[in-house]
């Protein structure tokens, strides 16, 4: 696994770019009932549907030029 890119960090968390290899982790977080309701859904999303959604989101994200 590549070294994560972190834009901001603290003692308890970090913020970095959206990554396809973390889709299962994102999906697990999003199964929390308050998030399901907050997203306007009535039922949880399947992992397969979330994986497909991440692929579409990443394909539509402009790539910034590398600074290295």
Image (cartoon, grey):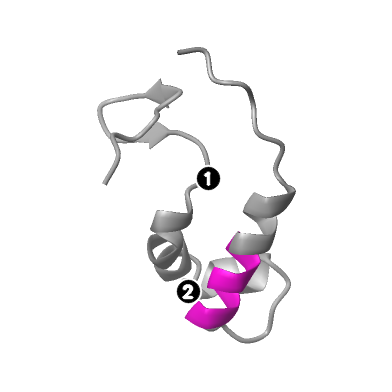
**Residue range (magenta):** 47-54
Q: Quadrant of residue 15?
A: top left
Name the outermost residue toward the top: 67
In percent of the image, x 45 and y 62: which residue is there? 23
Q: Secondary structure at mark 2?
A: loop
Q: Is residue 57 left or right of residue 28?
A: right
Q: What secondary structure characterizes most of the magenta part? A: helix
Residue mark closest to the camera, 1 vs 2: 1
Residue on which disc 1 sits: 18
Q: Is residue 16 above or below residue 67?
A: below
In front of the other: 18 or 38: 18
State which quarter of the image contains the C terminus.
Answer: top left
- Image coordinates for residue 44, horizontal then vertical, percent: 56, 82
Q: Quadrant of residue 29?
A: bottom left
Residue on which disc 2 sits: 31
In percent of the image, x 69 and y 78: which residue is there? 41
51 inside magenta stretch: yes
Q: Is residue 53 left or right of residue 27?
A: right
Classed neighbour count for the residue bearing mark 2: other residues with Cα under 10 Å, few (<14), some (14–19), many (≥20): some
In percent of the image, x 40 and y 69: which residue is there? 28
Query: Could you tell me how far apart the alpha carbons at marks 1 and 2 are, in whole angstroms?
Result: 18 Å
50 inside magenta stretch: yes
Q: Secondary structure at mark 1?
A: loop
């Amino acid at each position: 696994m590549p070294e994560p890119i972190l834009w901001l960090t603290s003692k308890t968390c970090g913020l970095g770019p959206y990554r396809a290899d973390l889709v299962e982790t994102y999906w697990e977080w999003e199964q929390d009932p308050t998030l399901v309701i907050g997203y306007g859904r009535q039922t949880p999303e399947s992992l397969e549907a979330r994986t497909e959604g991440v692929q579409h989101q990443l394909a539509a994200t402009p790539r910034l030029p590398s600074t290295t």
